[in-house]
Amino acid sequence: MIPGQIDPPARLLMGPGPINADPRVLRAMSAQLVGQYDPAMTGYMAETQELFRGVFQTNNDATLVIDGTGRAGIEAALVSLLAPGDRVLVPIFGRFGDLLKEIAARCGAEVHVIEREWGTVFTPAEIDAALAEVKPKVLAIVHGDTSATVAQPLDDLGGIADKHGALLYADVTASLGGNTFLADAWGVDAATAGLQKCLAGPAGSSPITLSDRAAQVINAREGAGADIRSNYFDLAQILDYWGPKRLNHHTEATTMLYGARECARILVEETMEKAVERHRIHGAAMTAGLVGMGLQLFGDQSVRMNNVIGVYIPDGLDGEAARATLLADYGIEIGTSFGPLAGKVWRIGVMGYNARRDAVLTTLAALEQLLRRGGVAVKQGAGTDAAFESYAAG
Amino acid sequence: MIPGQIDPPARLLMGPGPINADPRVLRAMSAQLVGQYDPAMTGYMAETQELFRGVFQTNNDATLVIDGTGRAGIEAALVSLLAPGDRVLVPIFGRFGDLLKEIAARCGAEVHVIEREWGTVFTPAEIDAALAEVKPKVLAIVHGDTSATVAQPLDDLGGIADKHGALLYADVTASLGGNTFLADAWGVDAATAGLQKCLAGPAGSSPITLSDRAAQVINAREGAGADIRSNYFDLAQILDYWGPKRLNHHTEATTMLYGARECARILVEETMEKAVERHRIHGAAMTAGLVGMGLQLFGDQSVRMNNVIGVYIPDGLDGEAARATLLADYGIEIGTSFGPLAGKVWRIGVMGYNARRDAVLTTLAALEQLLRRGGVAVKQGAGTDAAFESYAAG
């Protein structure tokens, strides 16, 4: 029995990602392939690099995409920067901090961590003090950690890391495009992302940018004879593939490249400033709507990601059953939580193609019905009214 | 200056891969996304697993796709099977054997190799003797090595590896779908592939299958505390994500999954037997056409891959200039060569969506004009006539 063609149900994906892809991205991905060294292909590769320089707000020559999901980009950065025995400091304020720790350990690095309660972030002084103590080669930190819904301010960290002789790596998978990120102005040495959040594409391609300094550290390892513990993620080799030498590495994932290029093109056309502002506006409207319905927000709102909102599940409601009902009856997906928030908090995403007024208002309208039928008292229209007010306030 | 939309030139890709994607695959990939744990998504994942069991000709429960190119699948298999210090034997008869060697070394394995001249393959006795001497944990070998255009017969190797207590890993990236491959019947413990060859899709997803024995070896490493040198390629974790536990690992590359599923669906609909026969027939017609034009074949024809043909560049012709002309004037891409064959041999692919009569005849017709205008004497129609004869012979 051979299954039928791909024919997914209509879904409005308002969780922490993946979210609906922008139809423009899917159209770009439906284009036919060309050869790996076809002038058209190497041209698309060069354009993709330049477009992502705009997205990362950088002049870094070493800007490209890794053929894998956001996690692949993280591993490429860490395995290429960290030699076995190198010290790395990982400040952890959510689940993806734990991931950085785990990946760094598998690179053979000596991993030091500092931890904060989920929903809070570190002060620059805390990180400064930890750097002074650990003296790591790399400070590796998540920007926006969707598991905890907050974003660690990074603007001071480049300078602080530099003072201690450390390179700054930032995982911006969940934040890029929806929250201000300035690779060069902030002195970030390496950053990696994914397409499936604010970039409005499918998972499977990981944009990365490396400062000249970071690229030098990586290239210096190339001669040393494969001490980078991966071939697929060996950025020294990958830079030679994307660079003028065009040395063969993997076969570029052409369709994902087409998609990544279109994701970047959409953002650069909009401008990064306006894209971030769009995420702020629609995230604020969703937040206002949730509060308007009487729900309680999770986490330090002063550092909340524009694109992910944590909200406590109302007492007496089975959060997972309610999520399943919302999906089955309204076709709307919101997110569950992990770790200390499991069973307590829903995570609602407003990002990428779905950072739109209709997506916000439809979700709030459906949530009102979901809560009411679940026995939670909600004033009629309180959610959407609050969202409209938020939109009016700008 | 923002570049325009993706709008690739029309190309007929008759090199060693990537080749043109089947339009059905591109259409499947244009479908909108669903959430990672949406019942529709987990349903597609399960269907994809079952379809690839058909493609690999296996009942292996542990059959899934890795989110990366063919090289990602190789690394996932080797890094998950090989602990630092483990011995591995890599018989090398082309460039991708060197890749297995390099990846295994980066896993920290003790790598032993035996080598043969490109264009030839090993006898079972040679591999048997090397296994007896090295006593490795894993025998890692390429099936069809496109760089050398030949396929190592694997049918005896499972039994031989087993006799020496070794697991058999086969890289079938370039062969699967176009050459007989029977994972279970041949006793192959692990095999990995890519979409961009006979599977008629774009690079970016790597199908993999693991015997129960291989899965046990990998799962036994999970408890040992992250001695697998990668998180992204940790098959123990990835099996828990694809398995009934559905433990979160990476965010599945949904669009690539849609594509991989359609690639497998096309082959399973056709049946693997007929797909291999199709590659044999069109590969034979192309080969006959090349010989008919007076060109000399490279490599041991008794073990030639059905889907890649090596042919010596005629004397007096600049092979790279001719390839560029063929691309620019006819929109047809054929392949260059590497290593010992660089500058001497073209590689012509007949595979996947392009294993078709019109693709073969068009390529031969264009090649005749290319050679003639390049000063190589070719009898008018000799190539296509020979191909027609080959088709008539079946």
Image (tube, coloured by chain):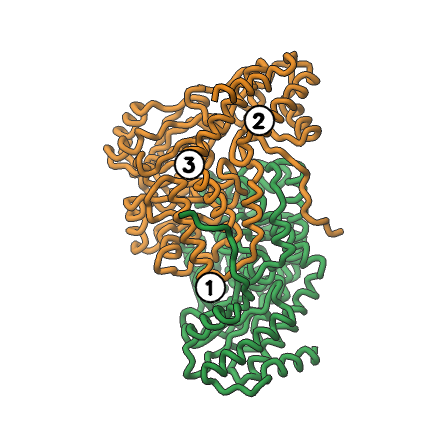
Chain colours: A orange, B green
Residue placed under numbered mark 3 in the picture = A272
Disc 1 and disc 2: Cα gap in Å? 53 Å
Q: Nearer the viewer, residue B74 or A217?
A: A217
Residue placed under numbered mark 1 in the picture = B97
Which residue occupies 42% across, 51% down?
A: A47
Whether labels 3 and 1 share one chain: no
The quadrant in which residue A314 appears is top right
> Which of pointers 1 and 2 indicates the residue nearer the eye?
2
Q: Nearer the viewer, residue B94 or A393?
A: A393
Which residue occupies 56% across, 28% down?
A: A357
Residue placed under numbered mark 2 in the picture = A360
What is the residue that sits farthest to the right in this orientation?
A1
Q: Nearer the viewer, residue B155 or A237?
A: A237
Q: Are marks 3 and 2 in contact (CB under 8 Å)?
A: no
> Which of pointers 3 and 1 indicates the residue nearer the eye?
3
The quadrant in which residue B55 appears is bottom right
Which x, y percent locates residue B237?
53, 41
Which x, y percent locates residue B368?
54, 80
Disc 3 and disc 2: Cα gap in Å? 21 Å
* Circle nearer the N terminus (3, 2): 3
Q: Residues within 10 Å of mark 2 (few under 14, many from 20)?
A: many
The amino acid marked with disc number 2 is Val
Vertical placement of B75 versus B358: above or below?
Answer: above
The amino acid marked with disc number 3 is Met
Q: How many marks?
A: 3
Disc 3 and disc 1: Cα gap in Å? 45 Å
Chain where mark 3 sits: A
Question: Circle 1 sits in a helix, a strand or a loop, which is it?
Answer: helix
Q: Residues within 10 Å of mark 3 (few under 14, many from 20)?
A: many
Question: Along the horizontal axis of the image, is A38 left or right of B284?
Answer: left
Q: Residues within 10 Å of mark 1 (few under 14, many from 20)?
A: many
The quadrant in which residue A365 appears is top right
